[in-house]
Image (tube, rainbow, N blue to C red):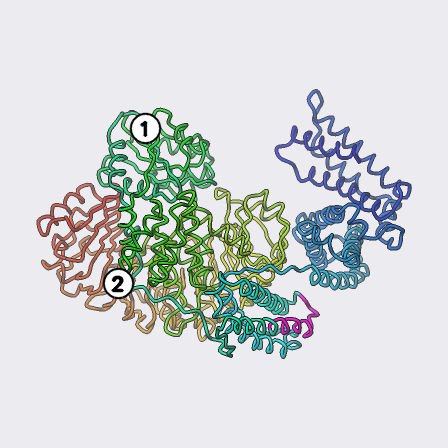
């Protein structure tokens, strides 16, 4: 065996000399040798003597010698062998000899040989069974991938998948939970060993049989049924239920909601357990009422904590049993399996009532299944971006002086400080300072973080400095091409580049050569936690160490954060501010806690903060824990969910909201939609200082958000501790991840290649999110086999995983899906997609997509979002769609491709509850006929946001009139004629109006006609307009009495805006993007004549 091990090591070294990487053929050869070695070891531990295995030993020795000779040829001074020779060697290693085959069978059939007890095997070598299963799994998995997921010689595909799943489960318990297995009763260990033995027999017999035989497949049906029965028994015996401890009440509400729908489920096994399910439901309602009063007492009572954990366990046991019935994971599940669950629930209720008596608490058990955690009060408005943030003017002025003064050579200025001190906030204030922005020609902000890729950093910077940047095209370029492109963009231009959160010198080294060293006063501003990193990057300048807040500044910040609170104890507040030790993040989080407490709660917080704690960082982490404990139960899951996203990522709130809803975190409300409740949750988290708003929507509200690095770290650690989700980082972690029992959410931060080849087996997982660590690749991957291992998924996000043009039909097996996000060049979705009756959100990113007409049979679908590069062509399914009631609940639809005539109106009548709609109007015979017609949309009483895009030449000249809904709040018009713009109070509730590439007669927008009136408009954007003249009545307040923000983007002919806009008292900001150079000074001049520009912020983003 030592010789074989030596051959394997040398084979790795040898192949590295002739191949880049490890070819599949070499990997296969290596695995076959390992298989021989492991099988012989297994046989020896089963009690076989060496003489009984002589043929196997001889065969292995011959193969090892030939491989050793082949490896020797790989070294210098020899002609390197081709990959063909390795392929020939692979053929020789296959056991063609009938005697060798017979030896295999004898070993596997032996059951009563002395010393062959599987319990004894585990005692002699506890790793042997796991190693044996590992090689069996590879041998059954390899043909599946190689043959395009067809079948292995003599077995059908479904039979192979049963084998694969059985081996994955065995591999899990024999590797990850081996210590637990070793401690089990001997009979249980014998059972596990016997199942391994039976599985091995099926696998090896299958591999030794070269052609398909019908009788063999039939025989295997019987064997596999027996195997499944025994695997199920082992699952019951070895299941150690470890469940998330977060938002138990929310989970129970979600579970009870699902239980109500079970009578409608068309599964035979449900009927068998109908009475027991009804009993479980009634008992859970009672238990849920009992638990409602516990959360506030958890930290003070160990018995309550134990009771709470037990309740979590029984709730998830119920969920697993029910879901398994629905997807037929346990085909022979009987009503008897629910009896222990019912007994456990009754036991918990009895214990809870006993504790209540001891503590004089009133835990009345009721049958009110609709009782939920108290929702947060609706905030008056969304918290503003960076509202009441620390300015530290003295620190900012010091940095500004270093930026604008000093040498003309490229200079690097570093700001160093502990996390939460406000480095990023300070740099952002400096970066946005007008005196700084006006000094530099080019600006870019790049977030580095602890985990980064050089290519991603280059793409970040290029996105800001390259006028011709197109993400999809640049992502395909090699790193050296991006380096040259960046250097070209910055050459002979005075630039300011911010590198935020630099952890190591390598990040700087990778970017340094892309920054030209022209003597024109360019600057690089970086932040870091580590002073040594800053000193190494620029040894000629001392790092600037950011100071903490003074006690007065801490108190000032705390007061500002509590400005919404009518009254509070000032003296106590001052003491608490001092105890924050000058760390702004601590102050902000403490303010979020205090805002929801009365005075006695303030005293408790003051007592928990200590002036004598070891460090400000320790105090900050302690404060984070306090904040988390003080969160309402319904917010804990929402907050922890931020940890699933990569660190420092800007998270689209709309996506986060859809995920929250699909996970069941958002409680139903009679007076509000789920989306509105989710917005309340977000505003609550922002108000508590836990979430930062990155970008606001044009009509108000959060567009993107993020959390501080420390909070992200807290979420990941807490989620792991609470078993809320599991993150697998990178290829190494993924390759060793075998799956854990009852992991509810699995988050993959890996590459498409490693995900495709992973051996994941997680049948209990309810959420699978994939984030591509290699964003630059455009490779296509397949996941058909993997999907068989995730039957209970409710949330599947593969938006970063390119599936190519063929959507795997296995998607339709995931009948519990509520959220599905996919990427690929799908031309047509399979009709079976309509089997996903629980699907609420469908997101597709790729090329033109045509959904089947059966999609109208998805009654719960609320969000259908097709990315900009995909279109939804309804013209082929109109006939079948008309009259369909399957999309009555649709709330959001984007992008819907339609012909622009009356067909649009017909189809809109099938969407009575639509609130957000984005349409692409395409050319057709009907649209030509209706070029000057009227399209009524006023019947869409719930429609709030509408985006219309013309998709063909000539439509600009069509004078189509749209009758817009009275309730419409946001309207975006692209490539249209100006006649489509609502006038004369046609859309009186508009808050946001965006006009993009609109065709105006004679290139003039004449608003002197009194019909142009927008009484509630707050945001107006004009983009890509060819107008050179824009006129209003002398009283600008008539047209836009409530206007707050005006955005002018790429209006390359416009030289002036109406000076009367200066009369609008509500106007706060004017943004100018890539417009004519003379426009900005003219705006300032005209507005100054009317009212002065002190109260209006004018920002210029690049001139044309």
Pick the front one: 76 or 964? 76
What span is colored magenta in the figure?
330-345
- State left or right for residue 1092 relative to residue 41: left
Q: Position of residue 593 (x, y in %)?
A: 37, 57
Q: Tell me, yes or no, whether the highlighted magenta stretch contains residue 341.
A: yes
Residue 566 is labelled as 2
In space, the residues marked 1 and 2 are separated at their CA atoms by: 48 Å
Q: Could you tell me which residue is drawn at 57 percent across and 45 percent down?
A: 753
Q: Could you tell me which residue is drawn at 85 percent across and 39 percent down?
A: 57
Q: Could you tell me which residue is drawn at 35 percent across and 45 percent down?
A: 581
Q: Position of residue 189 (x, y in %)?
A: 77, 56
Q: Is residue 7 above or below residue 981?
A: above
Residue that numbered label 1 is attached to: 411
Q: Position of residue 26 (x, y in %)?
A: 69, 37
Residue 1053 is labelled as none
Q: Tell me, yes or no, whether the highlighted magenta stretch contains residue 318.
A: no
Pick the front one: 612 or 222? 612
Q: Earlier in the sequence, mark 1 or mark 2?
A: 1
Pick the front one: 730 or 182? 182
Q: Is residue 629 above or below residue 101?
A: below
Q: Neighbour class for label 2 at 10 Å: few (<14), some, many (≥20)?
A: few
**Residue 873 visible in image:** no
The quadrant in which the C terminus is found is top left
The residue lying furthest to the right in this view is 51
Q: Of the residues tagged 1 and 2, which is closer to the observer?
A: 2
Magenta stretch: dominant secondary structure: helix
Q: Element under label 2? A: loop
Q: Element under label 1? A: strand
- Circles 1 and 2: CB atoms closer than 8 Å: no
């Amino acid at each position: 065996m030592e010789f074989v091990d030596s051959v394997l090591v040398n084979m790795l070294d040898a192949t590295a000399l002739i191949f880049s990487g490890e070819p599949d053929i070499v990997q296969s050869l290596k695995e076959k040798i390992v298989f021989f070695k492991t099988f012989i070891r297994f046989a020896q531990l089963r009690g076989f003597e060496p003489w009984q295995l002589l043929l196997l030993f001889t065969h292995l020795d011959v193969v090892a010698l030939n491989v050793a000779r082949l490896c020797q040829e790989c070294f210098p001074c020899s002609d390197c062998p081709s990959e063909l020779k390795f392929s020939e060697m692979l053929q020789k290693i296959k056991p063609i000899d009938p005697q060798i085959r017979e030896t295999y069978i004898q070993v596997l059939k032996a059951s009563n040989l002395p010393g062959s007890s599987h319990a004894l095997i585990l005692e002699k070598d506890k790793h042997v069974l796991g190693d044996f299963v590992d090689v069996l799994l590879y041998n059954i998995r390899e043909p599946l991938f190689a043959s395009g997921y067809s079948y292995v010689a003599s077995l059908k595909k479904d039979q192979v998948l049963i084998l694969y799943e059985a081996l994955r489960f065995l591999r899990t318990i024999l590797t990850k939970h081996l210590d637990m297995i070793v401690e089990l009763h001997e009979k249980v260990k014998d059972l596990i060993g016997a199942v391994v033995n039976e599985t091995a027999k099926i696998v090896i017999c299958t591999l030794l049989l070269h052609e398909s035989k019908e009788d063999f497949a039939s025989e295997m049906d019987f064997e596999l049924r027996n195997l499944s029965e025994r695997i199920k028994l082992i699952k019951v015996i070895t299941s150690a239920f470890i469940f998330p401890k977060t938002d138990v009440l929310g989970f129970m509400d979600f579970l009870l909601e699902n239980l109500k729908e079970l009578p409608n489920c068309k599964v035979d096994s449900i009927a068998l357990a109908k009475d027991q399910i009804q009993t479980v439901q009634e008992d859970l309602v009672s238990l849920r009422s009992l638990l409602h009063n516990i959360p506030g007492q958890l930290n003070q009572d160990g018995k309550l904590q134990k009771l709470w954990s037990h309740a979590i366990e029984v709730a998830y046991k119920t969920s697993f049993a029910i879901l398994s019935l629905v997807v037929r994971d346990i085909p022979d599940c009987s009503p008897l399996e629910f009896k222990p669950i019912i007994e456990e629930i009754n036991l918990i209720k009895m214990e809870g009532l006993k504790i209540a008596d001891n503590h004089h608490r009133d835990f009345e058990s009721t049958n009110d299944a609709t009782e939920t955690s108290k929702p947060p009060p609706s905030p008056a408005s969304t918290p503003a971006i960076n509202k009441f943030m620390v300015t530290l003017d003295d620190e900012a002025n010091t940095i500004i002086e270093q930026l604008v003064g000093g040498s003309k050579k490229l200079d690097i200025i570093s700001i160093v400080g502990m996390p939460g001190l406000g480095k990023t906030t300070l740099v952002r204030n400096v970066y946005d300072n007008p005196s700084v922005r006006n000094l530099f020609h080019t600006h870019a902000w790049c977030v580095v973080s602890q985990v980064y890729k050089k290519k991603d950093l280059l793409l970040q910077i290029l996105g800001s400095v390259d006028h011709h940047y197109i993400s999809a095209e640049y992502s395909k370029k090699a790193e050296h091409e991006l380096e040259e492109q960046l250097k070209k963009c910055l050459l002979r231009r005075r630039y300011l580049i911010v590198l935020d959160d630099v952890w190591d010198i390598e990040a700087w080294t990778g970017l340094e050569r892309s920054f030209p060293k022209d003597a024109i006063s360019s600057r690089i501003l970086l932040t870091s936690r580590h002073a040594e990193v800053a000193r190494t990057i620029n040894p000629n300048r001392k790092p600037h160490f950011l100071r903490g807040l003074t006690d007065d500044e801490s108190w000032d910040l705390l007061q500002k954060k509590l400005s919404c609170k009518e009254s509070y104890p000032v003296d106590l507040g001052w003491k608490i501010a001092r105890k924050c030790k000058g760390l702004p993040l601590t102050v902000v989080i403490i303010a979020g806690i205090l805002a929801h407490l009365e005075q006695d709660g303030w005293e408790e917080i003051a007592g928990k903060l200590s002036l004598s704690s070891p460090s400000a960082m320790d105090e900050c982490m302690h404060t984070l824990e306090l904040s988390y404990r003080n969160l309402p139960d319904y917010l804990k899951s929402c907050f922890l969910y931020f940890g699933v996203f990569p660190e420092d990522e800007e998270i689209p709130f709309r996506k986060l909201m859809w995920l929250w809803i699909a996970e069941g975190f958002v409680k139903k409300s009679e007076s509000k939609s789920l989306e509105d409740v989710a917005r309340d949750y977000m505003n609550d988290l922002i108000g508590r200082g836990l979430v930062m708003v990155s970008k606001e929507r044009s009509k108000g509200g959060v567009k993107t958000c993020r959390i501080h690095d420390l909070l992200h770290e807290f979420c990941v650690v807490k989620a792991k501790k609470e078993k809320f989700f599991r993150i697998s980082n990178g290829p190494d972690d993924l390759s060793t991840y075998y799956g854990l029992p009852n992991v509810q959410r699995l988050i993959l931060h890996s590459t498409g290649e490693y995900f495709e080849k992973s051996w994941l087996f997680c049948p209990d997982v309810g959420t699978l999110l994939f984030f591509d660590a290699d964003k630059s690749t455009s490779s296509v991957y397949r996941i058909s086999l993997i999907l068989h291992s995730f039957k209970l998924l409710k949330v599947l996000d593969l938006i970063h995983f390119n599936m190519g043009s063929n959507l795997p039909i296995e998607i339709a097996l995931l009948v519990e899906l509520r959220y599905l996000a996919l990427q690929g060049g799908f031309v047509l979705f399979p009709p079976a997609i309509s089997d996903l009756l629980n699907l609420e959100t469908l997101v597709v990113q790729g090329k033109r997509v045509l959904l089947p007409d059966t999609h109208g049979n998805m009654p719960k679908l609320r969000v259908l979002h097709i990315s900009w590069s995909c279109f939804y062509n309804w013209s082929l399914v109109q006939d079948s769609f008309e009259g369909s009631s399957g999309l009555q609940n649709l709330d959001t639809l984007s992008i819907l491709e339609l012909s622009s005539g009356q067909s649009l109106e017909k189809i809109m009548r099938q969407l009575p509850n639509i609130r957000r709609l984005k349409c692409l109007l395409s050319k057709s015979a009907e649209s030509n006929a209706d070029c000057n017609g009227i399209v009524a949309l006023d019947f869409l009483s719930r429609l709030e946001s509408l985006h219309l895009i013309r998709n063909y030449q000539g439509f600009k000249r069509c004078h189509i009139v749209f009758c817009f809904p009275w309730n419409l709040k946001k309207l975006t018009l692209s490539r249209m004629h100006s006649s489509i713009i609502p006038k004369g109070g046609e859309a009186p509730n508009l808050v946001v109006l965006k006009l993009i590439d609109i065709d105006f007669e004679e290139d003039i927008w004449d608003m002197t006609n009194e019909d142009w009136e927008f009484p509630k408009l707050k945001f107006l954007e004009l983009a890509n307009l060819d107008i050179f003249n824009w006129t209003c009545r002398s009283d600008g307040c008539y047209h836009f009495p409530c206007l707050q923000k005006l955005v002018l983007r790429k209006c390359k002919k416009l030289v002036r805006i109406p000076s009367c806009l200066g009369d609008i008292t509500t106007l706060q900001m004017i943004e100018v993007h890539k417009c004519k150079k003379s426009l900005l000074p003219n705006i300032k001049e005209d507005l100054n004549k009317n009212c002065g520009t002190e109260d209006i912020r004018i920002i210029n983003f690049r001139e044309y």
